[in-house]
Amino acid sequence: MTNVSEIAKNANASALVLAHLSTDLKNRALTMMANALEEHRDAILSANKKDLQFAENKNIAKALIDRLGLSEEKVRAMVKSIRSVVALDDPVGKIKSVTELDKDIVVEQVTCPIGVIGAIFESRPDAVPQISSLCFKSGNAVILKGGREAQHSNKMIAKLLVEAMRKVPGVPKFAVQMIETRAEGIDMLKEEQYIHLIVPRGSSAFVKYIQENTKIPVLGHSEGVCHGYIDKSADLDKAIRVCLDSKLQYPAACNAMETLLVHKDIAKKVLPDLAAKFKKAQVELVGCVETCRVVPDVSPACESDWDLEYNDLKLSIKIVDSFSDAVEFINKHGSGHTDMILAEDRERADRFLDEVSSASVMCNASTRFADGFRYGLGAEIGISTNRTHARGPVGLEGLVIYKYKLHGNGQIVDDYFGDNAREFTHKPLTPPT
């Protein structure tokens, strides 16, 4: 049996080959991967039934079961996701800038893959094709580690993807690999020599554990405490529609709204109707003292509610005195994931988008739009709340970094020292198209 160190070493060797694969070859392999999932839909759904039965027997949390389940529609979405990645520009080898240092010496900043990605995720088998296709198109090798609750689905999907890509001559054998056990996942966190980035997708406790137990850089978000704010200038019909979608369209998602803020001037106009609609949809509502006065059947919120990601049919509501109070509250209690304003005052909406320090900020649209596919990224390897090179839904552009390529003609640094030193020109040049 191959150990994790060998898996990581093989992945690194494959990454060196992947970095130089042509766009055409990568797209051919991706197309075959999409076709394989489409052709073996029944096998995927059969494997998923085993996982759902396991999850129910083990009393796994409802939010995880919601993410675990597959359907014909979800398999079609997997296929569509891979094909959308095929249609995207290859992010590798793009010249970002060209600078003339002096006569006959030029430096280029060129995009290149990160190397080997370790992707660790809970519950969602549709993450397997998303992550695999994005890593492959961006020239990165990937080691996948899913949760035991999705083991049958993950193994089936990964098997189909790997078999499909290996049919394309030139694709390295270990471009995509999967490990299964918890022990292997822990061992993967120790492979800083060969793994260059860890991407966790799961609960806040899960992501925090990863961050605290590896020397490898980690790209991810720990929580999705997302807010909606109904400003006093909001169109109330529009606000109700957007708020309902933000909470109800998929309550277990990390971009579902968890806290609703409402300006005091319109609270009595909008909250009774909105609360009634949430109640009809079986949403448990908790609120501040003022919210409970406006809607008496709302339960009092605890202080901890303002910092919780429910991933379920529960919502916190708070009435605020001003726009500035709303922004301050979000920046204090939010997780930096996704926050939105409902407002017809354009200046106030623009201020919200500027002043709220989250990865995705929205005006008059559901928080559920914070998604790689919906943003036109093809898919997403995850959503990052980091303040690094990749933030928000991370697609192809977040999986490349850059290198500097310098072209000279015998120049030496010593010529640029001393009394008769040459001067650098540092002249920006137009990158070739």
Image (spheres, rainbow, N blue to C red):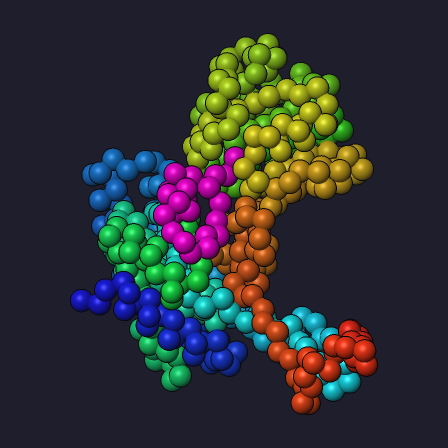
Residue 276 location (% of width, % of height): 54, 21
Left or right: where 41 falls relative to 324: left
> Is 305 drawn above or below residue 164 in the view shown?
above
Q: Residue at x 33, y 41 (%)?
A: 65
Look at the image and tell me in which quarter the N terminus lies: bottom left
Any part of residue 133 in sight: no
Any part of residue 409 in sight: yes
On the image, which quarter does residue 109 sit in? bottom right
Q: As drawn, which residue projects farthest toward the left? A: 1
Q: How many marks?
A: 0
Residue 248 location (% of width, % of height): 50, 35
**228 magenta-colored:** no
Q: Residue at x 50, y 56 (%)?
A: 380
Left or right: where 424 falls relative to 201: right
- Nearer to us in this view, 138 or 133: 138
Q: Residue at x 43, y 76 (%)?
A: 16
Q: Residue at x 26, y 50 (%)?
A: 182
> Is 283 drawn above or below residue 154 in the view shown?
above
- Nearer to us in this view, 338 or 111: 111
On the image, which quarter does residue 257 sit in? top right
Residue range (magenta): 204-225
- Nearer to us in this view, 326 or 214: 214
**217 magenta-colored:** yes
Look at the image and tell me in which quarter the C terminus lies: bottom right
Residue 353 location (% of width, % of height): 70, 41
Left or right: where 97 falls relative to 293: right
- Nearer to us in this view, 413 or 135: 413
Residue 241 location (% of width, % of height): 61, 34
Q: As drawn, which residue projects farthest toward the front? A: 419
